[in-house]
Image (tube, rainbow, N blue to C red):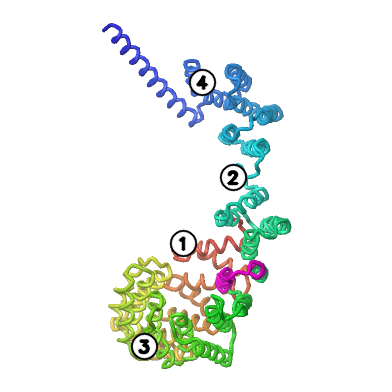
Amino acid sequence: MKRFLVFVFLTACCLSTAWAQNADAALAKQFSTNGEYQKALDIYQKLYKQDNETYFSAYVNTLISLKKYDEAESTAKKIIRKHPGMTEYVIVLGSVYTQHSQLDKANALYDDLIKALPADQGAVSLLASQFYQLGNADFAIKTFLQGRKLLHSEDLFSYELITMYRFKRDKAALTEEYLNLLPHNPLFRSQAENAFATLFENDADYEILRVALLKRIQKDPEQIIYVELLVWQFLQQKDFDQALNQSLALNRRTNGDGSDIFQLCSTLLANDAYDVAIRGYEYLISLGKDKPYYVSSRIELINAKNLKVTAGKYVPADLAQLEKDYIDLLAEFGKTSATAFAMQRLASLEVFKLHKLPEAQKILEEAVKINGIQPTLLASCKLDLGDVYLLNGQPWEATLLYSQVEKDYPNTNMGQDAKFRNAKFAYYTGDFTWAKGQLDVLKAATSQLIANDALNLSLLIADNSTVDSTGAALKIYARADLQIFAEQQDKAVKILDSIDVKYPNNQLSDDILMAKARIAIQQKNYNDAVADLKKIVAEHPNDLWADDAVFMLGDIYENQLNDKEQAKSYYQKIITDYSGSLYINDARKRFRILRGDVSS
């Protein structure tokens, strides 16, 4: 019984001591955080004497903070003599020398540790980790590289070295390390691309990658992943011709099915590189009708030509040729699930450029009846057919289709698009109350574009319904808006000009200016658009379209008129004058790019 009581007493004493030490350690840490190093040192010194090793690092680091280097050095040397094989104590001594500006002594210690490394993977990882934890990435890297030599393997420690090189922002070393890793681990290609995109800041950085890749390709021409990465590098620098050239060469060498080229062409189209994409599709077509991408490439080739023509100035003959290309393709391959996309594009051309509404309606009605059509493409065709019905004077058929898609795709971007088209249908036909109710719901849409457009249209209705409860002037404006949607610009301008004549005291002056600016942009008359937008900024700086006008001016100057300074000034105006604008994040990003900021 007495022994048991003694045991309980001793246990209680130990627990009490441990609790007291923990409390003291927490207090010392707080003192250190507050910069009260002497108070922290007094506690750590007591704790260190009580428990020689647990508080060693904290004690020495506090001595360093107080510039008591000799005492720190002496303490470290004592514990090293006690534990000669414990490398972490040697590294702490090295940090004492480093803080005391005795780098040669520190480096000599670290070099000795690395030289003494055994040919053991675990020992290498442990020492490197100890260096890294003390903030010495350079010697952590040296440790891993020495480990490779000792273990006779250049593949070891790749992930660790990649982490180190990213931490140090050593772009050349990171590049080489990824190029060592990827041939045996191709699934890491996306990770490598993300790392390069994050770290590389300019063309000079991408040149490091290009040169390294070309050397590797020369040395090992059969290594496909190097060519794939080179294609990616050319895309980042917008050297689209070279990207396609490399991809074509790789496809020929490997006798590939063209899937990479087909995917690349989609990227080229997204970057408005129409001529290069056309060249890619023509190559895929040249491979023959028995190849898997022949039909798709025929369709996409016409689509690429369509985008090229409509993106610039064109004449009626250009549009007529595009229409003929689509019709010839459908005649050759039939109207099937494989060509439904081409049918949709033909209908869009006929509606918005050729204004052949009956023809467009017929082709879309055929498309939605095709068996086996991909569900989202079917829904998209239904929405487009609804638009044609609306423009063709069949509004109830339009809203029926919109409602079908909304019901079939609830809580999705497709469903929200359908709901927005239904709301605009109500707006076009003068049912402003119902339209506003739908638009107010859509202000919380997951699609930022739909949410922005819904908010603007809701505010337009609210602003003009307050002043004129009948909405008479707004109804005329909505009719003009429908003609803008149909790209019937001359009709839209006549309707807009009639508003002031019929309702001279209307509140739509800034809305009319914005509508005319949109028409000018459709017609690629950018100087006319700039004039209307500047008038909005000058005369209506606090109205609905003010921030839209400022942002649009920045976009036009940047991407159409090639005046970067003017563009920058308008993006700056969004940041300073319209901080609550929906465009604030985009404006800030564009401003920084134009100013020449580099990514972090």
270 within the magenta span:
yes
Q: Mark on residue 53?
A: 4
Which residue lies under the disc numbered 2? 167
Q: Is residue 49 above or below residue 547?
A: above
The magenta stretch is: 248-271
Q: Residues within 10 Å of mark 4 (few under 14, many from 20)?
A: few
Q: CA distance from mark 1 to mark 4?
A: 56 Å
Q: From this viewpoint, is residue 527 visible?
A: no
Near mark 1 (Cα within 10 A), the count class, few <14, some 14-19 or many ≥20, is few
Going from N to C along the chain, the mark reached first, 1 or 2, is 2
- How far apart marks 1 and 2 lie (CA) works out to 34 Å
Kindly identify the residue that appears in the image at 38 percent across and 71 percent down: 455
State how far apart marks 4 and 2 are (Cα).
31 Å
Check whether the beta carbons of the residues at disc 1 and disc 4 lie within 8 A of each other.
no
Amino acid type of the residue that numbered disc 2 sits on in the rendered structure: Phe
Mark 3 lies on residue: 389
The residue positioned 65% from the left and 39% from the top of the image is 148
Q: Residue furthest left?
A: 1
* Mark 1 element type: loop
Residue 323 point in image, percent of width and height: 52, 90
Mark number, residue 579: 1
- Asked which quadrant contains residue 436, the reply is bottom left
**Residue 506 placement, left or right of 261:** left
Question: Sequence-wise, which precedes: disc 1 or disc 4?
Answer: 4
Q: Amino acid at mark 4?
A: Glu
Residue type of the residue flagged with mark 3: Tyr
For marks 1 and 2, give the one nearer the viewer: 2
28 vs 264: above or below: above
402 falls in the magenta region: no
Image quadrant containing the N terminus: top left
Q: Secondary structure at mark 3?
A: helix
Sequence-earlier tag: 4 or 2: 4
